[in-house]
């Protein structure tokens, strides 16, 4: 029906190969709750094959002139762009996200990731340090070898390409593992890589579960570097597995991001921005603002207008161009969302909107995993609903009385990924930005993502930064060469 393969194999050494186990996992379409393809259930044996292929490819690829590597990666971007509609549909079917989101934001962003890093490597500089009259130093930045790239299900190609592009552009070879829940666009990318002329073994994709494939990647002695995006609990396992082998590890983890609205904010802009930051991709974006804090003089008005604007979001079949809210990625994630909505009520919260499963949008989606945008008020700041990551279309709204109070609220969680602040007062914007514990602070906006800026989290939201120069540095090893005068 979707013109996509029934069985998704691994991509190793430039070939599509079945898993050593011979087993495949069901790949469920979240909008229908039905299996629509199967994905390789790989294990350490497949990772071993991929490591051998990446190892063989490394010498030539790392010595390939930068401009040539750049040209191949640019071709990958062009070919994804040519097939944008196919990629967007595949992403929508695989994840349950609205096709319009995949079409206008996610796949275009994956294309930009490839273009950005393919050209960034053409403009790098090497540092030099002169040591008085004694010596001259220069810094070589060399590829680290075979890198492991592990990504989650919420923004599959967007996040995987964010890792693959810089890793390959600087001359590494890679073994990537997409989430077993959303493998389709990674498969389509492999076809594109072959067409673009990426040499065999430079990019290998091994599908399967985290405990089987992910753990085999993080513990493999020949994989020197791990870039991981996913939940905090998994991130801890990745760190535990890689640290004794002294791997270089970047961890982009969970969040419980505050979204602060001061009484002097442009309320219309704050409401439109907050609806988006609360519910984009059904709230399944690590950067979603799940805790909204509103200064008391505008609290009632904000809640009224926020609920009214949210109730306009159309929950529907992800393949319908007019749908704003698609399906939740899996039955498990849907159950987690429902658990937290029940918990919120037990903790004293009032449901201002949503809160229970909507009727199916159409016959096709009768057994799909749908949950409406849900707004909860009246909760204490310190309750579990306000501290734990839900990762679904659920926000809480809480009033505050002073700047210091809301900064305390914002920082009183174990996470520190991102935050938004809405105010017309420039001095306050700077003051609050400086005090919030988060890797990103947006002022009067959300999800403006310049590819050059450092991206990552504080506290349990991660270790290290990716993006722009940070990514190029992460995927290279600096070596100082000191020449006596
Ligand atoms: P998980 O942590 O469950 O999974 C992330 C990836 O890790 C998947 O590919 C998963 O495989 C794999 N994995 C699972 N167990 C292991 C293991 N033991 N060793 C190595 N890899 C493993 O996250 P989700 O997929 O559920 O994604 C949601 C989470 O990701 C949220 O917490 C969200 O905040 C976070 N996230 C963070 C972002 C950031 O930039 N900071 C961006 C986007 C999401 P599989 O699923 O196939 O079993």
Image (cartoon, helix red, strand yellow):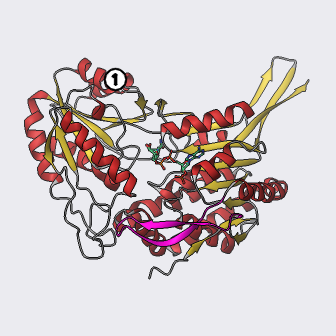
Q: Is residue 372 above or below residue 200?
A: above
Instruction: Give the residue drawn at x 31%, y 62%.
Output: 326
Q: Does the magenta segment cover residue 466?
A: no
What number of labels is visible?
Answer: 1
The image quarter containing residue 228 is top right
Q: Position of residue 320 (x, y in %)?
A: 29, 73
Q: Is residue 169 left or right of residue 311?
A: right
Nearest to the observer: residue 441 or residue 151: 151
Mark 1 close to ligand 1, CB under 8 Å? no
Quarter of the image where the C terminus is located: top right
Instruction: Give the residue drawn at x 37%, y 62%.
Output: 97
Instruction: Give the residue drawn at x 26%, y 45%.
Output: 394
Q: Position of residue 270 (x, y in %)?
A: 21, 42
The image quarter containing residue 265 is top left
Q: Does the magenta segment cover residue 29?
A: yes
Q: Is residue 314 above or below residue 234?
A: below
Instruction: Give the residue drawn at x 64%, y 69%.
Output: 9
Which residue range is magenta in the image? 20-42
Q: Is residue 481 above or below residue 360?
A: above
Nearest to the observer: residue 187 or residue 362: 362
Nearest to the observer: residue 346 or residue 316: 346
Q: Is residue 89 left or right of residue 310?
A: right
Q: Position of residue 131 (x, y in %)?
A: 81, 19
Q: Disc 1 on helix, strand or loop?
A: loop
Q: Is residue 150 visible?
A: yes
Q: Is residue 266 visible?
A: no
Q: Which residue is mark 1?
A: 412
Q: Position of residue 269 (x, y in %)?
A: 20, 45
Q: Is residue 168 left or right of residue 352?
A: right
Quarter of the image where the N terminus is located: bottom left
Quick one: which residue is furthest to the right in this view?
Answer: 485
């Amino acid at each position: 029906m979707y013109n996509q393969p029934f069985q998704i194999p691994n991509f190793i050494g430039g070939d599509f190969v079945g898993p050593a186990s011979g087993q495949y996992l069901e790949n469920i379409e979240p909008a229908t709750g039905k299996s629509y393809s199967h994905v390789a259930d790989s294990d350490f044996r497949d990772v071993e094959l991929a490591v051998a292929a990446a190892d063989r490819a490394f010498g030539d690829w790392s010595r390939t002139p930068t401009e040539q590597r750049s040209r191949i990666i640019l071709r990958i971007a062009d070919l994804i762009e040519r097939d944008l509609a196919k990629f967007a549909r595949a992403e929508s079917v695989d994840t349950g996200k609205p096709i319009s989101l995949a079409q206008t934001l996610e796949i275009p962003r994956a294309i930009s990731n490839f273009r950005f890093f393919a050209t960034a490597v053409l403009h790098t500089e090497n540092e030099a340090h002169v040591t008085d009259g004694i010596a001259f130093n220069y810094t070589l930045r060399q590829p680290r070898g075979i890198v492991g790239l592990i990504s989650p299900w919420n923004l599959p190609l967007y996040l995987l390409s964010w890792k693959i592009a810089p890793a390959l552009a600087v001359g590494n070879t890679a073994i990537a593992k997409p989430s077993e829940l959303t493998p389709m666009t990674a498969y389509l990318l492999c076809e594109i890589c072959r067409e673009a002329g990426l040499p065999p073994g430079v990019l290998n994709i091994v599908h399967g579960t985290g405990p089987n494939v992910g753990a085999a990647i993080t513990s493999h002695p020949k994989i020197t570097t791990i870039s991981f995006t996913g939940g905090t609990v998994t991130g801890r396992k990745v760190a535990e597995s890689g640290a004794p082998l002294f791997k270089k590890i970047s961890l982009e983890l969970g969040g419980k991001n505050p979204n602060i609205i001061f009484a002097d904010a442009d309320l219309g802009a704050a409401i439109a921005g907050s609806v988006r930051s609360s519910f984009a991709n059904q709230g399944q974006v690590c950067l979603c603002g799940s805790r909204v804090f509103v200064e008391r003089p505008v609290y009632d008005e904000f809640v009224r207008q926020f609920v009214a604007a949210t109730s306009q979001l159309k929950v529907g079949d992800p393949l319908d161009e007019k749908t704003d809210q698609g399906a939740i990625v899996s039955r498990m994630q849907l159950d987690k969302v429902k658990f937290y909505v029940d918990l919120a009520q037990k903790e004293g919260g009032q449901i201002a909107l949503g809160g229970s499963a909507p009727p199916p949008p159409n016959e096709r989606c009768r057994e799909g995993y749908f949950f409406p945008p849900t707004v909860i008020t009246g909760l204490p700041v310190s309750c579990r609903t306000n501290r734990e990551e839900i990762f679904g279309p659920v926000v809480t709204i809480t009033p505050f009385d002073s700047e210091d109070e809301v900064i305390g609220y914002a920082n009183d969680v174990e996470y520190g990924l991102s935050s938004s602040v809405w105010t017309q007062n420039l001095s306050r914007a700077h003051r609050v930005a400086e005090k919030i514990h988060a890797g990103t602070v947006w002022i009067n906006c959300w999800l403006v993502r310049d590819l050059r800026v450092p991206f990552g989290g504080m506290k349990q939201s991660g270790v290290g930064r990716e993006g722009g120069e940070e990514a190029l540095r992460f995927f290279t090893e600096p070596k100082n060469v000191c020449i006596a005068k």
